[in-house]
Amino acid sequence: MWFERVRALTLSLTRQRSVTNTEGETSFGPWLYDQLAEWPYFRTRPECLRLERTLDDRRERYTVFARVHGAGRRAVALCGHYDTVDVDGYADLEPYATDPEALLPRLIERLEREARSAADLRALADLRSGDYMAGRATLDMKGGLAVGLAVLERFAAQPQLEGNLVFIATPDEEDSSNGMRSAVRQLAELLPEWGIDLEAAINLDSGVGEGDDGKAVFLGSVGKVLPSVFFVGRPTHAGAPFDGVNAALLAAELTRRVEANPALGDPPGAAEEVAPPPVTLYQTDRRSRYDVTTPATAWCSYNVLTYTRTPADMLDMMLGETRAAMDAALRTLETRAAAYDRVAGAAVHAHAWTPQVLTWAQLEAQARSRGPAAIARMSALRDMLAADATLDIIGLSQRLIEAAAREAGLAGPAAVLCFASQYYPQVDLGQGPRAKAFLAAITAGTYAIAASQHARPIARHFLASRT
Ligand SMILES: [Zn+2]
């Protein structure tokens, strides 16, 4: 019974295409609200259903809140996002990407024609087994929302039960988290209005932990920052490499030090699990067309995950790595100038540069100290960038730093560090009495009930590393 209902709900949610930052995302909230408003439970209790527009958001999109009550004030939130990543990966099957029943036979047909690798063959066997539903967001995470809705429905039919459920479906998880950040503020008003208190929240996302160890329950989630570095070099003509400092070399040296380096990850033993080491998400120069002058500036962004460290810890770590990277890059230039001197007899010498490493706060203070005209130009730029819906946080950070570097007269070789995305703090249950009670409830529910109904084991992971 559960299975059929969750399957039907998943199909219906998936068919509403809702890619982040598109029209489909804007209309999904009102559509879901209308669906729930048809439920007998909400028809007689319209005050238990709310559609709220996200706050301080340049885009129009909505969160759906639905409350079902039993006895008492205590409540559990069931949370999920309805926006999805894009459908480009489906290539010629893109028109079927959000129609699971039409997509499945076509995917099987395509794999029968094209399957080569072991992974392709495994996918083909899985899809033929009938145990899988294909389609954008069936896994991440409309299937999870469907589970939440099915539970809500079942709970609504048993008003004598103790406790309350609050279902929350948010937009914009895949980009800037405007949905959940707004929902937290909106809940602060809704909960007192409804006269209930949140005891716990469950993220319905089910896309994690399905591997060889079977299904898993995650008791927390990893923290995430995006330290980013703007490098200023000294441009030089391609025929005179030792007269300048190539910003691309500075960036490359930092990336070499940071990429997948466990020494820059969480200290061992500090938490139940060790977070994956940092990786590079961007490494580009900032030129827009061909030029025989070396790149003047470059940009790197690194995804850093943590279970234990504060943003200040990670900023310190990145400042240290950036200083070391600049020193190493300049030493490389000196060594190579000497080597070139030996082979070409060219009497070249690398300059004795003094590299600077600044934080965004330090650079901004330097720019502002140039006087009221500089301050006015910077704040006009900030307003203009904030109004530009095509810029993401990285694009906005780059433009602000470039302008501040100009105002401050920052000369290369230099590096400016900032965080160029939302900060996602790590979350764990903690050790308090509520955490212990929740853990006991999860243990009883998951391992006693669910485990008896599933052939595959259900593992317990302390922290989720996927975000
Ligand atoms: Zn998700």
Image (cartoon, rainbow, N blue to C red):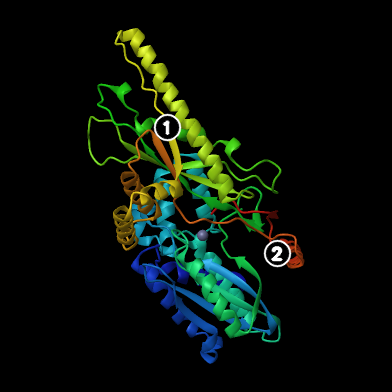
Q: Going 29% across and 11% down the picture, which residue do you hit? A: 346
**Closer to the camera, 340 or 163?**
340
Q: In the picture provided, is 356 more to the left or to the right than 159?
A: left
Q: Mark 1 points at which residue?
A: 355
Residue 380 coordinates in the image, percent (x, y): 30, 59
Q: In the picture provided, is 17 more to the left or to the right than 150?
A: left
Quarter of the rendering containing residue 34: bottom left
Is mark 1 in CB contact (under 8 Å) with mark 2?
Answer: no
SS of the residue under disc 2: helix
Q: Does the residue labelled 2 lie within 8 Å of ligand 1?
A: no
Quarter of the rendering containing residue 428: bottom right
Q: Mark 2 points at which residue?
A: 450
Quarter of the rendering containing residue 239: top left
Q: Going 39% across and 66% down the picture, which residue do you hit? A: 17
Three-letter residue code for mark 1: Pro
Three-letter residue code for mark 2: Ala
Q: Residues within 10 Å of mark 1 (few under 14, many from 20)?
A: some
User: Is residue 4 visible from the viewing direction of this image?
Assistant: no
Answer with mark 1 or mark 2, whichever residue precedes in sequence: 1
Quadrant placement of the N terminus: bottom right
User: Is residue 276 visible from the viewing direction of this image?
Assistant: yes
Residue 308 coordinates in the image, percent (x, y): 64, 49
In whole angstroms, how far apart are the C-alphas of marks 1 and 2? Answer: 59 Å
SS of the residue under disc 1: loop
Looking at the picture, does residue 420 appear above or below residue 191?
above
**Closer to the camera, 317 or 390?**
317
Q: Residues within 10 Å of mark 2 (few under 14, many from 20)?
A: some
Residue 32 coordinates in the image, percent (x, y): 46, 76
Q: Going 59% across and 46% down the picture, which residue do you hit? A: 313
**Closer to the camera, 321 or 374?**
374
Q: Going 55% across and 79% down the picture, which residue do you hit? A: 189
